[in-house]
Image: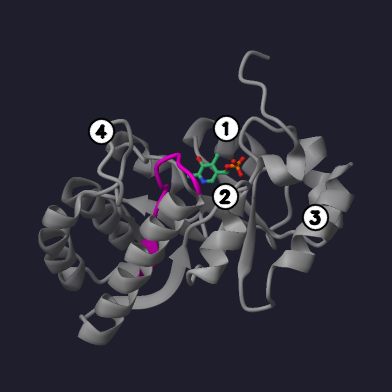
Amino acid sequence: MDIANNIEEIRKNIPPDVKLIAVSKTKTVEDMKEAYDCGIRDFGENRVQEFLTKYDEFEKDVRWHLIGHLQVNKVKYIVGKVFLIHSLDSVKLLSELEKRYSNEKIFVDALIEINIGREESKSGILMENLDELLEECEKCTHVKIKGIMTVIPIGDEESNRKYFSQMKVLFNKLKNENLKNIEMKYLSMGMSGDYKIAIEEGANVVRIGQGIFGKRNYNK
Ligand SMILES: *Cc1c(COP(=O)(O)O)cnc(C)c1O
């Protein structure tokens, strides 16, 4: 199986209203160009340094998604370059984004990352801290909240479904609350192993890496 075939197969499983993000972390620009030639325009990266080296290699029609934990001191490097930040998870990060983007008089869309499985090893905000972050989001004028994102704990199908459906409940709740500056447009969840379940449970953005590009090798 090659990249083009993988994309074709995955597209068969994804309804037209679900956005496919090709997660290209650790993968070469060459691999990414292959995906680009299949019509992929949304790429997901998790590290700022790697994202920046790849950024210059592509046309401006690529939409870059930052899906990994974003350190406050790295924000300055990405201003004006990303389409969507999936990993807003603290008031501190929000404040830095708001400051840097308003300085440039431009806007950024972001998703709040929820640590739905309450795993210490994972980033994302815990449910009990969400209200505080939401209150700060309501005051922002340059960071626009467009939905929520999660990476669920490793588990079986039943466990996956449970976490995905909890996210969908939260998504609907926030949608109904109609908070200022907080729109529920994207529900970003599901990766190579569980994206079909995620879509069944309401995801409209899936982030697929190995299912498109093959296994990752971190030792290269
Ligand atoms: C790596 C990664 C993915 C993609 O994982 P695959 O198993 O390769 O599909 C999705 N989301 C996040 C946040 C990731 O870091």
What residue appears at the point 68 percent right and 14 percent down from the top-left corner? Answer: 220
Tell me where the magenta segment starts and ends, as one range. 146-156
Return the residue at label 3: 7
Return the residue at label 2: 191
Q: Indicate the secondary structure of the residue bearing disc 4.
A: loop
Q: Earlier in the sequence, mark 2 or mark 3?
A: 3
Return the residue at label 1: 50
What residue appears at the point 21 percent right and 49 percent down from the top-left corner? Answer: 90
* Quadrant where the N terminus is found in the figure: top right
The alpha-carbon separation of the residues under discs 1 and 2 comes to 20 Å
Q: Earlier in the sequence, mark 1 or mark 4?
A: 1
Q: Indicate the secondary structure of the residue bearing disc 1.
A: helix
Q: Nearer the viewer, mark 1 or mark 2?
A: 2
Q: Position of residue 3 (x, y in %)?
A: 84, 45
The alpha-carbon separation of the residues under discs 1 and 4 comes to 25 Å
The alpha-carbon separation of the residues under discs 2 and 4 comes to 20 Å
User: In this view of the protein, can residue 178 be seen by the observer?
Assistant: no
Instruction: Name the outermost residue toward the top.
Output: 219
Kind of residue at disc 4: Glu
Q: Earlier in the sequence, mark 1 or mark 2?
A: 1
Marking on residue 120: 4
Q: Is residue 1 magenta?
A: no
Q: Ligand 1 falls in which quarter?
A: top right
